[in-house]
Structure formats: C-alpha cells, structure tokens
Amino acid sequence: MNDRFLLAKRLAQAKSALVVLQDRLPEHLRTELLQARQRGVEVEVLFRRFREGTYLNDLYQAGMRLFETALPEHEPSQLFVDQREGYAVPSGTAIEGAFSRICELLWRRIAVVMKTRGRVKKVFPQDFLVELEAGKPVFINIRGLGTVPLPKEGEAITVLGVADFLGMRGMALTWTLHISSP
C-alpha cells in the first residue's frame, strides 16, 4: 500500500471496505474511499472516541456506516478490502490474518452512529440534554459539542450522534457528533 495507485486499484475492484479510524485518514485515502463509495462499494467505519463531528458527518453523508467500537487505544488506523487484505494506515504495513482480524473488530462494535431530525421539545441546559418531539422519548446529549449554543424549544434540528437504545421506551444519542438546523 506504499504506492497510493496500488490502493486505488484495490478499491476500484473492491466490493467492501472496513476502516478502523483512530485519527484522520491521509487525504488521498479519504478521497479514494469517497470515490469507492460513489461507485457503490460498501464501507463501514469503526472508531474509538474519535469525535471530529464534521469529519464523521462527511463520511456518513457519503453513505458510510459508522460504529463506535471498543478498540485498544494503541492500535493504528487500518483499512481492510473485501475481507481478504488489511493494511495499517498510514504505514501501509500488511496485516496478517485479515479475515480473523475483521471478525474480531466487528464483535467490538458497541454503538451505531445515526442521524435524527426533529423539533426540540425541551432543553435541559444544566444537563446538556435536549428532548425531541417524538412518539417515544428521544434525548440528545450535546455536552460534546463544546461551544455550540443550545438549540431553542420548537427549533427544528438535525443531529448526527452515537445512539444507545433505552429498551422499548426510547433512544438516547449519548454523544452528539454534529448538529445543524435544516
């Protein structure tokens, strides 16, 4: 994978790709993945505490599926192509036993990233929580957004976040990655 053309060739022929994201990808690799996705390649992204919301939102908007995963902190970012080949990123070092490693990684998924839209029903500023109007309760933890102002009650918002389910009672986005008004 030292030669970016080799990776482009592999992604051009790929049916699927799995990315382990510990940090931003090199720009040429991100571009190759976006182009692969445009050609219909299925791309899943696994991350651990990576909280660059705009970056993750761009990947989500491109149709990639994102999952928060219990990954060891010290591992590099990785790319797997068609469940057969794996590479450390950015070094390009081949990963032995790619299929077994992929199976192990997929079992470590702990939450899914999803986008939800709605009107703000109630704001709990002391808890950094927002409740959306919905048939079942939907709560959004916006603590991780830093200096973004709290939305106002009645405001329509779109939120990309890490979703945890509250059983049959509702859902909570426990870590908000990106928020916008439609």
Image: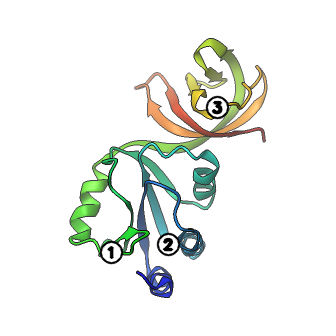
**Disc 2 designates what residue?**
41
Instruction: Find numbered disc 1 in the image and state the secondary structure of the residue it sits on.
Output: loop
User: Which dot, 2 or 3, sits closer to the camera?
Assistant: 3
Q: Is label 3 in a helix, a strand or a loop?
A: loop
Residue at mark 1: 93
- Residue ID at (43%, 76%): 15
Instruction: State which mark lies toward you, 1 or 2.
Output: 1
Question: Which amino acid, by three-letter code, is at mark 2?
Answer: Val
Residue 145 image position (x, y, % from top left): 63, 33
Rendered location of residue 177, percent (x, y): 59, 40
State the residue at coordinates (46%, 85%): 3
Q: Residue 26 versus residue 12: which sits nearer the camera? A: 26
Q: What is the number of the mark on residue 54?
A: none
Front residue of 59 and 167: 59
Direction from residue 172 to residue 71 in the image, left or right: left
Q: Which mark is residue 146?
A: 3
